[in-house]
Image: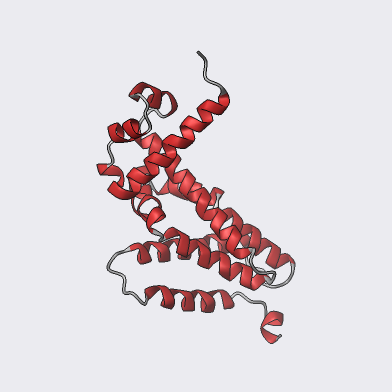
Amino acid sequence: MRRSKADTTETIRKLIEIARVHFTEHGYANAALESIVHEAQLTRGAVYHHFRSKKELFRAVLEDVQREVAERVEGDAATSEDPWQQLYLGCRGFILAAVEESNRRIMLIDGPAILGWETWREMDKSHSMRLLRGQLEMMQEQGNIRMLPLDALTHFISGGLNETALWLANESAKPEALDETMKVLDAFLEGFRTVEMEAK
């Protein structure tokens, strides 16, 4: 009996959800594909029909995490109508979402290690970085932010956010590190205001 497209989509969704839990709890190296298959009540053949390897399944999980983090960024930014608050809240939302336990290991530790930084950056570019670039472009058009080269500015800020998230994800980071980070973030973004905005 042929499975419908909806059945296939549901199977893939279920696999990703279960695999995400296993990758979060055990890490990529210690997550057993057999355990994921068993919990999903599927055969290995059925899993390999959708994902050729454990690595490919992990890639789908990381993509899912990146998408959720981007949704968090967009949602946090949308809580304000002020462009500067939107920028700050979006950046803050990215850091907070990235270091959450359900995302931290997959996104910041195993993601770059297993798939490589090039793949990781491409995913980030399609999700959170895309939103950041859109916000900066809108603010430049409105005269809220200095007219610096947009691509360079986007990568500069995004790189800082990624490195900060990696630092915070380190278990040895001091408890007050998050509060300190937000103070630095606020001061950092303020440096890009236009002279006209600073005078207001």
x then y, percent, for residue 91 = 53, 66
Visible in this render: residue 147? yes
Q: How is the image coloured?
A: secondary structure
Farthest-out residue, top: 1
Residue 189 placement, left or right of 50: right
Visible in this render: residue 159? no
Residue 68 placement, left or right of 163: right
Quarter of the picture holding the C terminus: bottom right
- The answer to whether 117 is drawn above or below residue 193 in the figure is above
Q: How many callouts does the rendering have?
A: 0
Residue 46 placement, left or right of 35: right
x then y, percent, for residue 36 = 33, 35
Farthest-out residue, bottom: 199
x then y, percent, for residue 67 = 52, 49
Farthest-out residue, left: 30
**Foreground residue among 197 and 176:** 176
- The answer to whether 111 is drawn above or below residue 50 in the figure is below
- The answer to whether 188 is drawn above or below residue 163 in the figure is below
Q: Image quarter for residue 84?
A: bottom right
Q: Residue at x 51, y 27 (%)?
A: 8
x then y, percent, for residue 159 = 47, 61
Q: Residue at x 57, y 25 (%)?
A: 5
Q: Residue at x 67, y 77 (%)?
A: 194
